[in-house]
Image (cartoon, grey):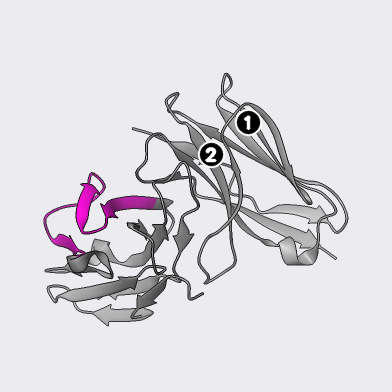
Amino acid sequence: EAGVTQFPSHSVIEKGQTVTLRCDPISGHDNLYWYRRVMGKEIKFLLHFVKESKQDESGMPNNRFLAERTGGTYSTLKVQPAELEDSGVYFCASSQVPQGAATQYFGPGTRLTVL
Amino acid sequence: QKEVEQNSGPLSVPEGAIASLNCTYSDRGSQSFFWYRQYSGKSPELIMSIYSNGDKEDGRFTAQLNKASQYVSLLIRDSQPSDSATYLCAVLERADGLTFGKGTHLIIQP
């Protein structure tokens, strides 16, 4: 069974540019989560999808971040325009049922560097 | 604001000894508690989950939870060099996102 996959693995962009990160959850997992780890800080929750619906986006830093999950399969996270403080590792995780009852499986992450 | 605190380490333990990792959390409403292991450059991997007070054992790993004192611990018996990694404590209040600590860097010395 394939795990959670993320693309790209690395992205280097300049301040003001746009970047789109993609996450493919484990097949059959309705719950999809985005997290971010900024250097020196802990991994922080960004948002949670159940199928195509956003359940909780309380962790999204600001309106420069837009997450979508059309069709309830893969998800994208767009940063527009990117700022220096957006640099970090963006993780995606998925689970079959809401957390508390099932394991969240993490992808390998996308390392974003904004210059 | 919910917080999870861990000693960042590094924690150095001789091979074969018991490694003890600790975590405290601020939100008394937290219901579920997790330990993830993360090797450098890799994704976090769940190794233990615990939901009620007391101990939970799985192979060489034992998780301990004390909700009254708001702490969670992880014991690794017969530590192996392959256990060297960063261990992340995570808590969940509701069925949404995990709140992570910064992690403890564990080094098992052969």
Q: Does residue B46 lie above or below B5 as drawn? A: below
Q: Compare marks 2 and 1 and give the one earlier in the sequence.
A: 2
Considering depth in this image, is B98 or A87 the residue closer to the camera? B98
- Image position, residue A54 (x, y; %): 20, 51
For numbered disc 1, what is the local secondary structure?
strand
Looking at the rendered structure, the kind of residue marked 1 is Leu
User: Which quadrant of the rendered structure holds the C terminus of chain B?
Assistant: bottom right
Q: Does residue A63 lie above or below B56 as drawn? A: below
Q: Is residue A47 magenta?
A: yes
* Cβ–Cβ under 8 Å for marks 2 and 1: yes
Q: Which residue is mark 1?
A: B65
Residue positioned 37% across, 51% down in the render: A44
- Image position, residue B97 (x, y; %): 36, 46
Which quadrant holds residue A87? bottom left
Residue positioned 37% across, 36% down in the render: B94
- Image position, residue B59 (x, y; %): 78, 51
User: Which quadrant of the rendered structure holds the N terminus of chain B?
Assistant: top left
Q: Which residue is mark 2?
A: B33
Residue B89 appears in the figure? yes
